[in-house]
């Protein structure tokens, strides 16, 4: 199948590209910049442009049968700084994409939403897809709004979407924009010899999913022909203190985290219910948290060895995806 991966040079997108190529699909990538950490993938067509540029998107959609929308102009920590830009660069740009897809008869869409922010403070943990959406920050509000527009286009325009709500993805090739993920942040700081900073007492619980497992889920869901909304997580919760313990075991170093005042915007406990995905797709994550941290650690050290540099420092908190 002829696929277009929006954001295919990014952290998650580059792994989705790998799985699409391995599955025998024709792949076109649309992104602002080339991948930072590796050369172009053989057989993949690369187009570079701005997601907000409707004409560039239209050109990228030529002869495409399936679109992976993995682009987000903001992260939870940056969306609050400029909510208007969050709306303009994400919601309005996505509406331009949806209109272009309808115009050119491209029906299949896989959209990466957010399992960490759209539910807000959940009533039930683990949290299922049927839970009410009550986002508490701009990032989650925008993700939930885009979901609703996509479902509107499904009902009224014939779009055939799969919406995946990932938990907290982490892993290799993360960190290139400097605002991604607590695990990569901590590992970066270990290599740099910098202190680890934690908002609160480290009791915040998150659901961490290795990026390769998430990418595989995206491709399986896309190939299934199903339409709907699905969580994408491990179904297991891990506290920040336990993450630190795993990192100490992997790196062989004793860490002395600096605990800072807790923030009111942080959800105390976020774990995704994965029963629907398992029953619909037969999918289970294959990578344990410690193995994923180990793979990330090996990759970061290889980047440092090859270039003498590391990815920029990312947020020092347990952000939600």
Image: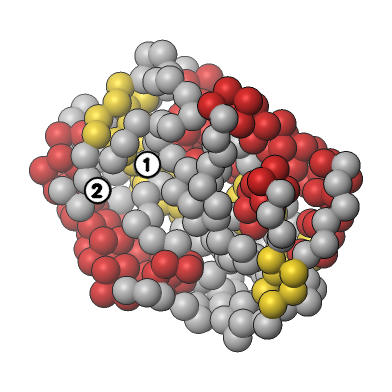
Left or right: residue 25 compared with residue 123: left
Quadrant for the C terminus, please.
bottom right
Q: Which mark is residue 275?
A: none
Q: SS class of the residue under badge 2?
A: loop
Q: Position of residue 72 (x, y in %)?
A: 38, 55
Colour style of the rendered protein structure: secondary structure
123, 194: nearer the viewer: 194
Q: Residue at x 71, y 31 (%)?
A: 298
User: Badges 1 and 2: C-beta atoms under 8 Å apart?
Assistant: yes
Residue 148, above or below 302: below
Dot 1 or dot 2, earlier in sequence: 1
Instruction: Let me know if residue 178 appears in the view.
Output: yes
Q: Residue at x 63, y 25 (%)?
A: 305
Residue under numbered circle 1: 7
Q: Position of residue 88 (x, y in %)?
A: 23, 66
Residue under numbered circle 2: 51
Quadrant for the N terminus, please.
top left
Q: Position of residue 258 (x, y in %)?
A: 74, 69
Residue 11, above or below 240: above
């Amino acid at each position: 199948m002829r696929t277009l991966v929006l954001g295919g040079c990014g952290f998650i997108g580059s792994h989705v590209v790998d799985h699409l190529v391995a599955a025998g699909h024709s792949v076109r990538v649309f992104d602002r910049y080339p991948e930072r950490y590796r050369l172009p993938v053989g057989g993949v067509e690369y187009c570079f442009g701005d997601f907000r540029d409707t004409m560039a998107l239209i050109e990228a959609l030529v002869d495409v049968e399936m679109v992976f929308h993995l682009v987000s102009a903001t992260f939870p920590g940056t969306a609050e700084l400029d909510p208007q830009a969050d709306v303009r660069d994400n919601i309005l740009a996505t509406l331009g994409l949806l209109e272009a897809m309808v115009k050119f008869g491209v029906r299949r869409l896989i959209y990466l939403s957010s399992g960490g922010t759209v539910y807000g403070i959940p009533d039930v943990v683990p949290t299922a897809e049927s839970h009410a959406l009550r986002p508490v920050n701009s990032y989650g509000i925008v993700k939930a709004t885009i979901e609703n527009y996509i479902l509107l286009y499904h009902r009224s325009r014939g779009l055939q979407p799969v919406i995946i709500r990932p938990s907290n993805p982490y892993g290799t090739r993360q960190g290139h924009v400097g605002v991604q993920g607590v695990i990569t942040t901590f590992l970066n700081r270990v290599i740099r010899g910098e202190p680890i900073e934690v908002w609160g007492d480290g009791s915040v619980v998150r659901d961490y999913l290795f990026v390769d497992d998430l990418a595989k889920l995206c491709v399986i869901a896309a190939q299934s022909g199903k339409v709907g909304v699905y969580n994408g997580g491990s179904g297991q919760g891990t506290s920040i203190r336990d993450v630190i313990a795993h990192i100490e075991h992997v790196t062989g170093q004793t860490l002395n985290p600096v605990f800072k005042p807790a923030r009111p915007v942080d959800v105390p406990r976020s774990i995704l219910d994965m029963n629907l995905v398992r029953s619909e797709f037969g999918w289970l994550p294959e990578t344990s948290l410690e193995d994923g941290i180990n793979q990330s650690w090996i990759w970061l050290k290889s980047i440092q060895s090859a270039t003498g540099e590391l990815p920029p420092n990312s947020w020092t908190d347990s952000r939600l995806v």
